[in-house]
Image (cartoon, rainbow, N blue to C red):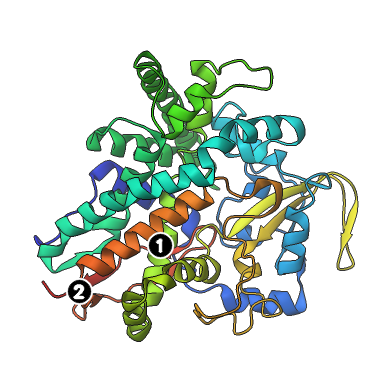
């Protein structure tokens, strides 16, 4: 890194790299041709494709030896996600949920899930999202404008890693303390690094993950108590939850608010970094398209939607069959897990013509970048608003943005999590 660039704070940068190492399988540069072959010849595969990459899987997070089937087709993945009674998500509590005391929204079903979603709904309403958009844009502008005089950067280290952290913690309502915020984010990423396929590495990383989860709880609880003492105001997530009421009209106590906030933290920023990074690579490799979007900002949302389809940050979801089922002639017994290749489904040529092309003009179809069904990502609109703010700020403040010819070109890598490790660019000062 040259003296003309600045890097993200050490802790978060190191932990982001650690997450990439565990889930990324950096040698997996382009799995899509392989997925295309599976869609044609073995759309329902017995076994977990992630095990072949030596990457931890939500389908068998604790290496219990559970029987796993991998689904590659859009129609099949969508069917599973839209049928929570036949295909439950409760197995996710064995994964991330174990660090959160079993309090994981995506691992909840039925009445409990409805109650928690209901408590959170006002904070993610169109009114709230509109207010958050107005909050996010100045943050993005300030960060990119500060970078502009340098004329060159690695956009991952210098912008796309620290900025989404700053934005999402502002939305949640944490104090405006850059160093503290980055440490919160680093701890959250340490939770994600918990699973390892190597037993000795797993022992050490799981200890670190549980410790980080407890520290995150303790520090978040302190923030919640401080906010309540100040009067429970504010249009951020903590403010909404401090004013929320349960099904019987009772206010949530500080512990419940803390649990609700903490569950969002592990993936709150790093998936945005990966998604936006891959989308930016697509634009930088297509200068004419980049210029077209610069001149017509109505296309920004199309770019974001196509980016989420074209290179999904989190490539796999997981569910568990509650009864014996059969998919495309393959019998799946009750209790077996389904590893859902959403990254493959989003490139299913039967749904997305010329699926490997980055085409913002294609007919819009529901893509699985944020899941689907009852567990559609609650923060989807927040993430899209973050990316919209960042892209507009980059287009406004970095004229003639282009890949740095003197640096290695960006490469999107990874298996379970995909994204570029670096994006070296230059622009006109």
Work out which residue is located at the far front of the displayed protein and give it.
127
Residue 32 is left or right of residue 187, and the answer is: right
Horizontal and vertical percent position of residue 99: 54, 31
Q: Earlier in the sequence, mark 2 or mark 1?
A: 1
Secondary element type, mark 1: helix
Residue 409 versus residue 417 in the image, above or below: below
Quadrant assignment for the C terminus: bottom left
- Pointer 2 residue: 399
* Residue 193 visible in rendering: no
Task: Name which residue lies at 50% across and 54% down.
Answer: 23
Q: Which residue is mark 1?
A: 276
Decide if residue 96 is on the left or right side of residue 82: left
Residue 251 can be seen in this image: yes
Closer-to-camera residue (258/243): 243
Q: Nearer the viewer, residue 159 or 205?
A: 159
Label 1 environment density (alpha carbons within 10 Å; few <14, some 14–19, many ≥20): many
In space, the residues marked 2 and 1 are separated at their CA atoms by 19 Å
Q: Position of residue 297 (x, y in %)?
A: 37, 71
Q: Position of residue 401 (x, y in %)?
A: 23, 75
- Residue 258's label in the rendered image is none
Residue at horizontal 44%, vertical 48%? Answer: 130
Would you identify the image quadrant in which residue 2 lies?
bottom left
Q: Is residue 308 above or below residue 220?
A: below
Residue under the image location 50 percent in, 52 percent down: 381
On screen, residue 390 versus residue 221, left or right, reads left
- Above or below, 321 relative to 306: above
Looking at the rendered image, the quarter that the N terminus falls into is bottom left
């Amino acid at each position: 890194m040259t003296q003309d660039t600045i890097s993200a704070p050490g802790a978060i940068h190191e932990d982001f790299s650690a997450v990439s190492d565990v889930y990324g399988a950096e040698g997996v540069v382009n799995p899509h041709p392989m997925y295309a072959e599976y869609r044609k010849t073995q759309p329902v595969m017995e076994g977990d494709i992630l095990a072949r990459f030596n990457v931890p899987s939500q389908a068998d997070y604790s290496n219990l030896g559970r029987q796993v089937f991998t689904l590659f087709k859009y129609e099949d993945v969508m069917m599973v996600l839209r049928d929570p009674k036949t295909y439950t998500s409760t197995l996710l509590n064995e994964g991330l949920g174990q660090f959160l005391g079993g309090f994981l929204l995506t691992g909840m079903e039925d009445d409990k899930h409805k109650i928690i979603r209901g408590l959170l709904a006002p904070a993610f309403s169109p009114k709230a999202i509109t207010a958050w958009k107005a909050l996010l844009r100045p943050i993005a502008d300030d960060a990119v404008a500060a970078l502009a005089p340098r004329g060159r950067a690695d956009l991952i280290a210098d912008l796309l890693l620290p900025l989404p952290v700053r934005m999402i913690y502002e939305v949640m309502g944490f104090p405006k303390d850059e160093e503290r915020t980055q440490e919160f984010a680093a701890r959250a990423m340490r939770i994600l690094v918990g699973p390892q396929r190597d037993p000795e590495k797993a022992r050490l990383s799981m200890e670190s993950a549980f410790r980080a989860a407890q520290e995150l709880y303790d520090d978040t609880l302190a923030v919640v108590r401080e906010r309540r003492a100040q009067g429970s105001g504010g249009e951020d997530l903590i403010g909404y939850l401090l004013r929320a009421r349960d099904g019987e009209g009772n206010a949530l106590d500080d512990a419940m608010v803390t649990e609700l906030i903490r569950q969002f933290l592990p993936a709150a920023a790093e998936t945005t970094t990966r998604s936006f990074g891959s989308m930016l690579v697509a634009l930088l490799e297509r200068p004419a398209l980049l210029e077209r979007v610069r001149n017509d900002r109505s296309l920004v949302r199309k770019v974001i939607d196509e980016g989420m389809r074209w290179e999904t940050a989190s490539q796999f979801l997981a569910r568990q069959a509650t009864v014996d089922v059969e998919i495309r002639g393959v019998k799946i017994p009750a209790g077996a897990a389904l590893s859902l290749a959403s990254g493959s489904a989003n490139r299913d040529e039967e749904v997305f013509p010329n699926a490997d092309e980055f085409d913002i003009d294609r007919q819009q179809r529901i893509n699985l970048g944020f899941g689907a069904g009852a567990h559609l990502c609650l923060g989807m609109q927040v993430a899209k608003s973050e990316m919209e703010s960042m892209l507009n700020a980059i287009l406004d403040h970095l004229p003639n943005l282009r890949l740095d010819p003197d640096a290695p070109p960006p490469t999107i890598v990874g298996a379970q999590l995909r994204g570029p490790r670096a994006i070296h660019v230059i622009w006109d000062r």
